[in-house]
Image (tube, rainbow, N blue to C red):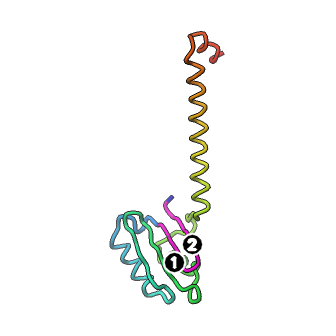
Amino acid sequence: MSYYVHHVQGRLRVKTPFIKNDLQNAQAVQRLLKRTHGINDTTVNTLTGSAVILYDPKLISSKEILDILNEAGYFDLSKAVTNDEYVYSAAAKTSGFIWRSLAGALLEKALQGSAFSLISVLI
């Protein structure tokens, strides 16, 4: 997932490919947010492509911050995934993997017998 949002009151974490492995773009994001009234601090991580934004919810909302990033071209709201959506997606992938592994193990066990077992499975 390229765009990710996690929010708790006063703290916003966004993940965007715009700043991943790009120090110049990360610094541009920091400069933009530093000029924004109500934002207290911003930390960017170019390795993960994420920015943690600490803000005063009395002065600015997380939606306004996301809109600022979106309008500047640093974040694509239409592609953003929330923490809940990310966790659900990961759980769905994991359960699919577990079921495929279990089915494979059962099939392997059935085929461990004789050639007759193989023929019976194929029929």
Q: Position of residue 53 (x, y in %)?
A: 48, 77
Disc nearer the start of the sequence (1/2): 2
**As drawn, 60 above or below 75:** below
Tell whether position 36 is magenta: no
Q: Position of residue 55 (x, y in %)?
A: 51, 83
State which region is magenta. Answer: 2-15
Residue furthest left as drawn: 24
Q: Say which amino acid is labelled 1.
A: Glu
Q: Which residue corresponds to the image point at 57% horizontal and 81% vertical from the top-left?
A: 64
User: Are discs 1 and 2 less than 8 Å apart at CB?
Assistant: no
Query: Would you say the magenta stretch is mainly helix, strand or loop?
Result: strand
Residue position marked by numbered label 1 in the rendering:
71
**As drawn, 112 above or below 59:** above
Label 2: element kind = strand
Decide: few, some or many residues near mark 1? Use Cα within 10 Å; few <14, some 14-19, many ≥20. Answer: few
Q: Which residue corresponds to the image point at 61% horizontal and 60% vertical from the top-left?
A: 85
Q: How many marks?
A: 2
Decide: few, some or many residues near mark 2? Use Cα within 10 Å; few <14, some 14-19, many ≥20. Answer: some
Q: Say which amino acid is labelled 2.
A: His
Choose between 23 and 87: the one closer to the eye.
87
Q: Which residue corresponds to the image point at 42% horizontal and 85% vertical from the top-left?
A: 34
For the C terminus, the quadrant is: top right
Tell whether position 14 is magenta: yes
Choose between 33 and 112: the one closer to the eye.
112
**As drawn, 27 above or below 18:** below
Choose between 3 and 54: the one closer to the eye.
54
User: Picture quarter containing residue 111?
Assistant: top right
Label 1: element kind = helix
Whole-Å distance between the Cαs marked 1 and 2?
19 Å
Residue position marked by numbered label 2 in the rendering:
7
